[in-house]
Image (cartoon, rainbow, N blue to C red):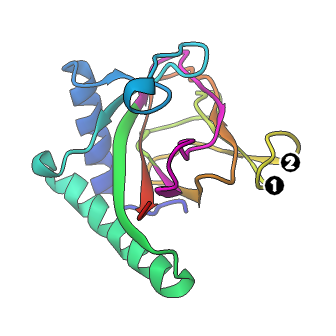
């Protein structure tokens, strides 16, 4: 959904993300959960900062309010049983990537729908960091889409069904990535 979020709000989110990045508030992203969480530079090299309800800025609150509208509409129209949202800012510095993966953890069914909002001002073809998503559920070969990480674009897909990857960034790339969750 290009232009999902008001451009001013999206720009504020992007600027805030980069300021937090420069201040060292991000940490290396890992693979797995809990005691199985590992830093695997062969799989992913991005950095994350989780959204904390107690520390939300006004632009973050605005974005989450928009997502709440989506959650309610999805539940009303598709009976998905989405109960909440968890998410983080992600920064992919130059050269960073995330190899093909699914977003649902092996031992949990909670993550149902992946939601990504891109926060890149003046993104240009050739900057890298595109999302590659395969279009056949369960497959990571064959037909796929390439999504440019343009400011304010929102991408949604079923977390356990669609393989995807982030292609290497040639310029710092920012986003908010999160998941609508069901009880599980």
Left or right: 18 with respect to 108? Answer: left
Quick check: can you spot residue 6?
Answer: no
Whether 37 is drawn above or below 133: the answer is: above
- Identify the mark at residue 13; answer none if there is no mark: none
> In the image, is residue 99 part of the stretch drawn in magenta?
yes
| Residue shown at 50% from the left, 22% from the top | 171
The local secondary structure at tag 1 comes to loop
- How many residues crowd mark 2 within 10 Å: few (<14), some (14–19), many (20+)? few
Quick check: can you spot residue 156?
Answer: yes
Whether 83 is drawn above or below 93: the answer is: below
If you read the primary sequence from the N terminus, does the residue marked by circle 2 or circle 1 appear first?
1
Residue 168 image position (x, y, % from top left): 61, 22
* Residue nearest the observer in this picture, 47 or 59: 47
Left or right: 60 with respect to 89? Answer: left
Q: Residue furthest left?
A: 54
- Identify the mark at residue 136; answer none if there is no mark: 1
**CB of mark 2 within 8 Å of CB of mark 1?**
yes
* Residue nearest the observer in this picture, 147 or 81: 81
Q: In the rendered image, which residue does mark 2 sit on?
A: 143
Q: Over which residues does the magenta segment extend?
A: 91-116
- How many residues crowd mark 1 within 10 Å: few (<14), some (14–19), many (20+)? some
């Amino acid at each position: 959904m290009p232009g999902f979020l008001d451009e001013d709000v999206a720009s504020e989110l992007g600027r805030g993300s980069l300021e937090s990045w420069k201040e060292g508030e991000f940490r290396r992203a890992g693979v797995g959960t809990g005691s199985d969480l590992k830093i695997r530079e062969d799989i992913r090299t991005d950095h994350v900062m989780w959204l904390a309800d107690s520390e939300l800025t006004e632009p973050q609150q605005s974005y989450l309010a928009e997502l709440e509208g989506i959650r309610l509409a999805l539940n009303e129209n598709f009976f998905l049983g989405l109960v909440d949202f968890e998410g983080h800012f992600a920064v992919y510095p130059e050269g960073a990537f995330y190899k093909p993966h699914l977003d649902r953890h092996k031992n949990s069914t909670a993550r149902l729908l992946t939601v990504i909002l891109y926060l890149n001002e003046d993104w240009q073809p050739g900057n890298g960091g595109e999302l590659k998503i395969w279009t056949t559920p369960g497959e990571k070969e064959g037909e796929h889409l390439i999504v440019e990480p343009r400011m304010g674009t929102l991408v949604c897909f079923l977390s356990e069904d669609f393989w995807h990857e982030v292609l290497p960034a040639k310029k710092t790339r920012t986003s908010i990535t999160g998941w609508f969750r069901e009880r599980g």
